[in-house]
Amino acid sequence: MQKNVKGAVCRAVRGRSMRSVMRTIYVLFDLDGTLLDTLDDLWAAVNAALRHGGCPQISRAQVRRFLGNGAVQLMRRSVPGGESHPGFQDMLAYFKQYYAAHCEEKTAPFPGMDEALDRLRAMGCRTAIISNKFDAAVKKLADSCFPGRTDLAVGENEAAGIRRKPAPDMVLSAMKQLGADPGDSIYIGDSEVDAETAAAAGLPCILVSWGFRDRPELERLHPLFMADRPDQLPDLIREFAAASAPEKGGSAYD
């Protein structure tokens, strides 16, 4: 699925219909490792849950590698034996409770992210946060870290039949809520899960190197663009908008 990321933008551009000059670009963000540096709070919550269950502590580097697929998968990878451990469900519940109470202790936007979001808003973009983190935490962090800077924030909601990433459901649901056209939309993330999510939703992808995966690993996923600093994102969105604009009428982002 990862090798289809480049093809996603080609399909989106080929299938594009004529739109007005003042088109809106929809920028769909992953949260952890993309907008927010959440690693230390997640590491603390994992180890608190492991201590609660009498299990060995794990390193920050291990938690970094385990992130990307939501709380259940994070704990499956962190608890010895995963779900087969008799205390797994208790530790998972403890993790969620602990993290909800402590998710803002060290978490902060990556340097330059507030300014990048402000520039995107000034360009007329609409933005959304789409995360595999449980929904209450996503909304809490969006409200506290990015007040007025995003249009929508959604977290895991598989109980409602919306599959978590890398299935496209969360992205497609967010796009529907925003009224977004696929040809005017782009997804930004920091991992293989994000590249797969974008491809599954038929969207081009920007991968960022400041998150939970290293740049060489991300380059092998062949995203439309790579970004090494948040201040590069608005210019990459301009480039996407110009390259994907209808042949007649140009782009409002030129």
Image (cartoon, helix red, strand yellow):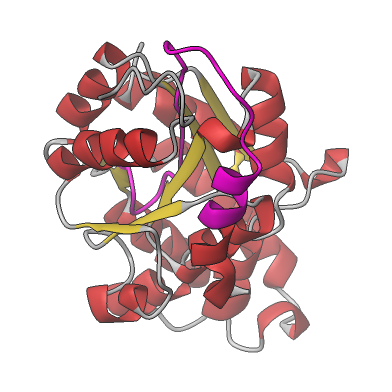
Residue 237 sits in quarter? top left
Task: Report whether residue 89 is seen.
Answer: yes
22 drawn magenta: yes
Looking at the rendering, the stretch of residues picked out in magenta corresponds to 9-35
Task: Report whether residue 70 is seen.
Answer: no
| Residue 57 rendering spot, x and y as whole percentages | 39, 79
Give the vertical position of 41 relative to 213 (above or below). above
Residue 84 sits in quarter? bottom right
Q: Quadrant for the N terminus, please.
A: bottom right
| Residue 143 rendering spot, x and y as whole percentages | 41, 19
Query: Residue 75 or 3: which is nearer the viewer?
Result: 3
Which residue does the image show at 86% across and 38% down from the upper left?
160
Query: Residue 183 or 148: which is nearer the viewer?
Result: 183
Give the vertical position of 125 relative to 84 (above or below). above
| Residue 227 rendering spot, x and y as whole percentages | 22, 55
Residue 45 sits in quarter? bottom left
Which residue does the image show at 29% across and 72% down from the upper left?
60
126 drawn magenta: no
Query: Residue 100 or 156: which is nearer the viewer?
Result: 156
Which residue does the image show at 60% across and 47% down from the upper left?
14
